Each structure stands twice: as structure tokens, then as C-alpha cells.
Amino acid sequence: MADLKDQTGYIGSRVEQSTRELAELTDREYKYGWVTPVEQDTVEPGLNEDVIRLISAKKEEPSWLLDWRLKAYRHWLTMTEPRWANVTYPPIDYQAQRYYAAPKKRPQKPGSLEEVDKELLKTFEKLGIPLEEQKRLAGVAVDAVFDSVSVATTHQDILARKGIIFCSFSEAVKKHPDLVKEFLGSVVPYTDNFFAALNSAVFSDGSFCYIPKGVKCPMDLSTYFRINAAETGQFERTLIIADEGAQVNYLEGCTAPIRDENQLHAAVVELIALEGARINYATVQNWYSGDQFGRGGIYNFVTKRGICKGAGSHISWTQVETGSAITWKYPGCILQGDDSVGEFYSVALSTKRQQADTGTKMIHLGKNTRSTIISKTISAREGNNSYRGLVQIMPKASNSRNYTQCDSLLIGNKCGAHTFPYIDVRNMTSRVEHEASTSKISEEQLFYCKQRGIGPEDAISLVVNGFCKEVFEHLPMEFAVEASRLLNVSLEGSVG
Amino acid sequence: MLEIRNLHAEVEGNEILKGVDLTVRAGEVHAVMGPNGSGKSTLSQVLAGNEQYEVTEGQVRFLGRDLLELPAEERARLGLFLAFQYPVEIPGITNSYFLQAALNEIRKSNGLEELDAVDFRKLLEEKMDLVAVDHSFAERPVNDGFSGGEKKRNEILQLAVLEPRLAILDETDSGLDIDALRIVAEGVNRLRTSERAFIVVTHYQRLLEYIVPDYVHVLYKGSIVKSGGKELARELEARGYDWLKEKSAVS
């Protein structure tokens, strides 16, 4: 555990100068901060059983699902909000939040584009996610989620030919209830934690994906989450099941308008990999992060977990976290099947007043299970970044191995980096390695670049990109380019 | 090409340079020698534009421009190169990527077209051959995992690629064994042209056996106390610096 805040003052005035340069560079506007004018179907703020019944009724859900929501809600009432994370924020008034918001003109047939509101199509196009047939992204199927509902899912026909199901969660509940019933809450039960319980009670929509036995998904699947409505929480749920020998790459992107109030995003993602299956899940999170005074921004309290259920299965999480006012997120893997593999590659950037407490959990249950954790955190301005990770090797997990590497990069002298590793080994034949490093973008590095003719802004971006390279290598090409661009934009004016 | 007049500079309130005068013309090689703490590295860093050092007095003109007014990157783009005494590591960024970015910045600011990856690669390979470094340097991260000798050779490779008008070698010989020293010096000699000037900053005369200077200057307590031809270096080697110290104390 290393608190470096105090040790960083010594560099003194030269850092301040370069910090000023960096600060000027870092203050770029958040590009996705606009609001779509769309008529909303919302529920009144507040949370009680009636609200949950109303959400369930709006979605025409079967009674088993309503019962599950109600059980989750009643359990949630007995829980208290976790306060162990290394973040600070004022108390959240859960009764002041709206738990459902949907654009009024919803398509009758889920997934049919003809009936999607033009404003929504325009919204996603502006976000770089065209949904119309002729414009949509080649090679990537997209499920577009706007506030509480999925507005469209592209390429469904091509996928269906392979037996792949990719649709909104609501549609899955209607069309594939058995799969949903079998797997919903099987990796993240509603009792798991406070935010998972809340999500289970009020979740609105999200993506559902099933890859049948032996099928390699012919294109990347992607969900794009957009928060639009004010004072509304987003509680989506993603469930991905890769049957025996199946393979899928999944990408998730997120943005939200600029608002002075904080907004809550409490999602749950569950991944299930059966024998020999492989799931690669990549996120580029770019929720609005608030301004330099810490006003506004998304509270991103997310539970993501995968289970390598079958032997030889493989789950890989790659995340690039650049947005949100507060990030509380630990995508993990339960390595149940023998010889299964879990991976976590993460870049988390905190600048302005952003706070991130993020990491992973690797739970080794099966024999010869392997996990790799590569975490890169970047703190700039007054950002505060904590890596928190659990590696647990259970008694039956013979010959298991974990390798963890946590690197922190500090830019300027008002930011903080912390590492909280938890290691619990209960099997003598297993091996756990943990390496950690903290470095500052040094004046020397910047001067060296400048002496070669590279300007200060490009110099910072060069050093930061080099720092993140091991993680970016695990992103699909376009995502890696986007992630690199996002980092550069976020760092403009912040390094200083 | 370079004219330094009465240059004073300090770091954290301590005056290190106390009135340096030096004129360097195209094609010349100047050696700046001196005991530890005389201000040799400070002179290099000040010329390159390290903001850690504050210039309190004097002028420096470089290719007709007021050098001290320019930020470090502008000086580099104008054709000033510093081979660092302690080259800096940039993990995750390959030499090739770094040098292409640097060269294109310099070309852009001189109104030349940027080189694409293919053309740059060709150029880089030629230069690696010219200064006799292994082609594996291209894809290794900048100075990361390099031995001391490799770092110094990497500086010379960068010098070869960026083709500056004035190259300052700051104690490039420090930490090199005799073989590495010879290779580095041969690389530098191949880069000597009638257009390009060098300032070779060194503590020992040894390097000057290989890179033969036109002029030798002795920097002592922040000013140049003696200048001469290449034979001055030998004299310093034989007599040390002490006789100059006495001399400067008297004057």
C-alpha cells in the first residue's frame, strides 16, 4: 500500500511550471456533453415496491422476474452502502433518483429500426454509432441503450443464422426466458453487494448475448450506453453466455451529458463461459467526469464478474476508464473449471477531481487455473486513483498461478495513487506474484522529448501511451485508437 | 553559427555559469573540458533549453536567432541537438516511433513533408548502419532496458537520424569502456560535415583521441579560463586542472 501524495511535493517549482503547461492542455471540453430533446416516459423520483412493480409492468415482465426484483429490493433495504472504497462523496439520496426513463416513442417491435425515433438515431450517429442499415458499422453488431431502454440492435439477422442471440435484455426476457431464468444472478447474486442488489431491483434494460456450442462469433458484439435524462439513474444489466467451445469479443462504450448534478450508474454484468469457451470483454468508459471543481459527473458503481464454469474456459476483461466522477468497479473472474484462465487489463485515468477505486477479483477454485492482472493507473491534477485487487487461491486449486502487476503514473504534485492488494492463498502448490511500481512523468522525460523537437502536449501523450501499451495491446484496433485519443483529450491541460 | 556572450545561469539560486563566451562556426568541433562542478553540463542544458536552469545575463545567438527566447522544442527544430549524459527511458514507446515523431516535427517546422512509416524505416535502417547499431534498436523501447553503452549509442543514432546543425555531446564518453568509446566516436566522426558543428563536453582527454577537436576550452568555476588547439587537451591530461585553478585564483 503506498500513499504517494506527500512524497510528490519535492520536485518543486519546475514541476509546477510544467504542470501549468499541462493544466492548460488538459482542460478540453467533454465532447459528448449535449442532451437529446426527446419526450420522456419516466416514473416519479423515489424507490418503493410500487415503483418496482411499475417498471416490471412497463416491461411486461413475467411474474418470476417481478418476484426476483422484489426479493432483491427487500434484501437491499437491509444493506448499507459500502464505504470502504478510497473515495469520498456526499450521501446519495436514493429517494431523489428516478429509476426509469425511456423515450416515449418506443418501437413496438424491439430491435426494429424503422420505428426508432429519428432523434435517437441522430443521437447515436453523433456519438459515432450509426444504427441505420446502410451506415452501420461493419463487423460490429451494436445494441444501443438510451437511458433505461435498448433502442436498437443491429446485425441481428446475420447473427441469428449462426444461432447467436444478441438482443436487448427486455427482448431476451420475452423470447428466451429459460436462458435468462437459468443464468440471471448466477454470477452476481442480488445479495452480492449494495449496488448489485439495487440494480437487481430496478434494472431497466441492457444487452443479452448467447453464443451456441462451438460457434465463433463472426463479428464483435457491442453495447453503447447513453445516459440522457436528468436526475435519472442508469441501471442496466448485461448477461453474456458462451456455450461450450464458443468464442466472442464484446465491447462496451458509455457517455452522458454534462450536468451539474451527479448521476448514478449502477450496472451489473455477468459473463458465463462454459467448457472451452472464450469471452473477451472490453470497455472504454467515458461517462461525464464532472468539472475541475468536482461538480457533476457520473457515480459509476458497477459490478462485473465472469465465471469460467467449464474446464479450459477463458475470460478476459480489458477496461479503459477515463470518465466518471467516481469509479467503483472490480471486474473479476471465478475460475471454477480446471485449467481455466482469467485476465484483467486495466487503464484508469483520474484527472480534475475524479476518484477511482478499481481493480479486480480473481477467485481460483479449479486446478491449474491461471490469472493475470495488469493494472495501469494515471493520476493527474487532483485526481485520486486506487488499485484494489483480490487474488484468492482456494484449497482445491492446485498448481494455480497468478501474476499481478500494478503500475501508477503521477502527473503533477496534487494527485494521488494507492495500491490495495489482497492476497489469500490456501493451496501450497500454487504461486502468486505481485509487482507494483509508481512513477512520475518526470521533467526529464518531458525535456528529453522536447529536446528532440516534440512539443509538450505530444510529449505527455507519448509518455502516457507508452505507459498504457501493455493494456492497449489487448483492445481491438479501433478501440485502442479511441482509447488513446480519449486519454489525450482527458489529459489536455491536466498535466501540470 | 553559435555565439555565446557573457552567459550567466543559475539553478535553485546558485550561480553556475558566470560569464561564458564561446563562438562556434559551421564545421568546427569544439571540446569543452573542465573539472567536476565547473559548469560543463549546465552549459549543455542551458543551450538545449532546460527550464530548470535560469539564465540571468548574457546572449546566445544560434543561426541568427535569439536562442534564449525559444522553448526547448523550437531549439531542437531549428537544429540544436543534445546527446544526454544520462539518456532518459520512455517505456512502451519504440525508438522507431519516437524518432519518427521527432523527425517529422523537425521536418514540419522546416517546411518539409513528413515521412511516412515506409520511408522513415528506410532512413532509419541506413542510419543504423551508418553508426553501426544493431537493427533491433528500432523496435526496442526508448532507452528502456538498454545498458549504459547502448544508451550512449542510441543517442548517436538519434543524432544521425535528426541531422542537427549543432550537436552537443554531454559527457558521451562517461561510463563507456574503450571499445564502446571507439564505436561511438567512429559514429560521430561519420557525422562530421562542413555544415555541422559539434561541442564535445568531456572530463577526460581520452574521447578527444578519437574525436579530434579544432578547439579546446577549459571551463572552470563557470567561465572559460583557457582556450587553445587540440594540444591543450594533452596538456590537461598530463598536468591535470590544478595549475589552471591556481592561475584563475591569481587572475
Image (cartoon, rainbow, N blue to C red):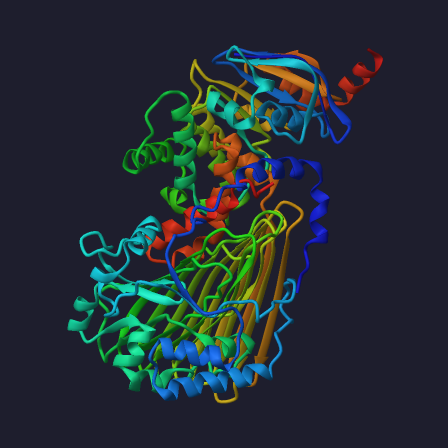
Examine the rendering and report whether any part of residue A428 can be seen.
Answer: no
* Point 60% across, 31% down: residue: B171
Vertical placement of residue A84 versus A454, above or below: below
Q: Would you say B183 lies left or right of B116 here? A: right
Q: Would you say B24 lies left or right of B192 here? A: right
User: Picture coordinates of residue A304 (x, y %)?
Assistant: 45, 72
Q: Which corner quadrant holds the N terminus of chain A?
A: bottom right
Q: Quadrant of residue A166?
A: bottom left
* Point 65% across, 39% down: residue: A15
User: Picture coordinates of residue A9 (x, y %)?
Assistant: 72, 46
Examine the rendering and report whether any part of residue A480 can be seen.
Answer: yes
Vertical placement of residue B125 versus A89, above or below: above
User: Picture coordinates of residue A258 (x, y %)?
Assistant: 49, 51
Vertical placement of residue B190 versus A363, above or below: above
Q: Nearer the viewer, residue A449 or A360?
A: A360
* Point 84% across, 13% down: residue: B250
Identity of the residue furthest to the right in this view: B250
Q: Nearer the viewer, residue A290 or B118?
A: A290
Q: Which corner quadrant holds the C terminus of chain A?
A: top right
User: Picture coordinates of residue A392 (x, y %)?
Assistant: 54, 79
How many numbered discs, if any?
0
Q: Nearer the viewer, residue A432 or A49?
A: A49
Q: Quadrant of residue A222?
A: bottom left
* Point 18% across, 72% down: residue: A160
